[in-house]
Image (cartoon, rainbow, N blue to C red):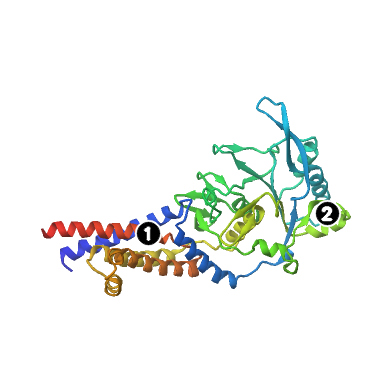
Amino acid sequence: MNKKQFFLWLGIMANALAMILLTFYFMSLPWLAGDEKLLIWSTSAIKFANREVPASEDFALINTSYDLQLIDRLDEFGFPVGQRVITDREKLTIILDAIAKGENTPKYIICDIHFLDSTIFDVGLDTTLQKFDNLIISYHLNDYGEIETPIFNKVNRGLSDYVIGSVFDGVYKYQLLHHDSLKLTPLKIFEDLNGTKSESIGPFVKIGNHWTPNNFIMNYRLLQKDIENIEAGFNPVNLGELLYLEELDIQEFVAGKIVVIGDFFENDMHETLFEITAGPLILLNAFLNIQAGDTYVNFWFFLLLFVSYCYFSYMVFVEGDYMESRITKYFGAVKLANYLAGFMSYLIFLTLLSCITFFLFNIHLNVFFLAITFYLMDKLVGLIYAKMKN
């Protein structure tokens, strides 16, 4: 190998490493290109058709959509200016108090309710909530990105906003840590149930001994239609309906299960990859993703990216490539196709790579943005070569 070839391959490997870093930066962005959504939907649909549905007996879903109460809406000076609707905290207190008395307690309780306003039932509810050491409540960020602290500040809580994805037109990506410090609810649930700790390291989150991208496309195991299908066994029971049961029956309903309490049908609905889905169900799916290690990365994932990006970098630094010549040959009469042949070649190869990474490692790549990057580098190197020849 001569000196020129040595520096060529050194540049190819350096560029491959740089593109791996850029890949994880693109993963952290809160949006997807339209073509990427189609690719992600189609590949996810294939995997979803062969999904492993969790056992329905491991979960108890309690719906609060129809159990509401009116409270005063206060202005900035504390004066009532009308009324607002919140979850009925009296009913919630009664149910949780009955659960707390049972010998066989739930495995975990996810209470996806926004406890921001005060009511006359808060003292009793706060006392009941503190009886559990395996319970978490939700908190949110306001329009300015500031934490809206729940009134029950002595109770375990997690951030339940869909920080990544909902910025635009739906919850497509999910984030585990916001601003490297605020842990989202599914991650905190996993920590509590498994006795492990997590920390943010660059674009990754280290969970115990495993590494995962902080932002990822969710692999849904449960859809909204599953909880609406009586035969599936996941049907949420309305909070008020539980009040008709004896305490022993309530305790038996939740014993040893992960209990999810929240609005499953009305006011907490979000667009996702497949359909409009309830917020509590999105939280549960995110937890199941972490529990199954869906997005854990390993040496083989990085090796696959490195080898693939070395080839793409070779396409950048060495003039011409097979795919581009084929596209030019068959569509050369179309000026636009001829001009974009290089971009299409990168897009096709990256699409194939993303399919491989998804089916092997459950990780999608932002193929459109990566293809643009490789294509622009290709054009830049071509201009440099042209100037050198002149």
Q: Residue at x 75, y 58 (%)?
A: 236
Secondary structure beneath dot 1 equals helix
Q: Quadrant of residue 105?
A: bottom right
Q: Which residue is mark 1?
A: 370
Q: Tell me, yes or no, if residue 194 can be seen here.
A: no
Image quarter where the N terminus lies is bottom left
Q: Say which amino acid is labelled 1.
A: Leu
Residue 44 placement (x, y as % from top left):
53, 67
Q: Tell me, yes or no, if residue 94 can be seen here.
A: yes
| Label 2 with label 1: CB-CB less than 8 Å | no
Q: Which residue is mark 2?
A: 242
Mark closer to the chain start, 2 or 1: 2
Secondary structure beneath dot 2 equals helix
Residue 71 placement (x, y as % from top left):
76, 36
Horizontal relation, residue 101 to residue 182: left or right: right
Q: Residue at x 79, y 52 (%)?
A: 239
Residue 246 placement (x, y as % from top left):
89, 55
Distance in Å between CA atoms under marks 2 and 1 = 52 Å
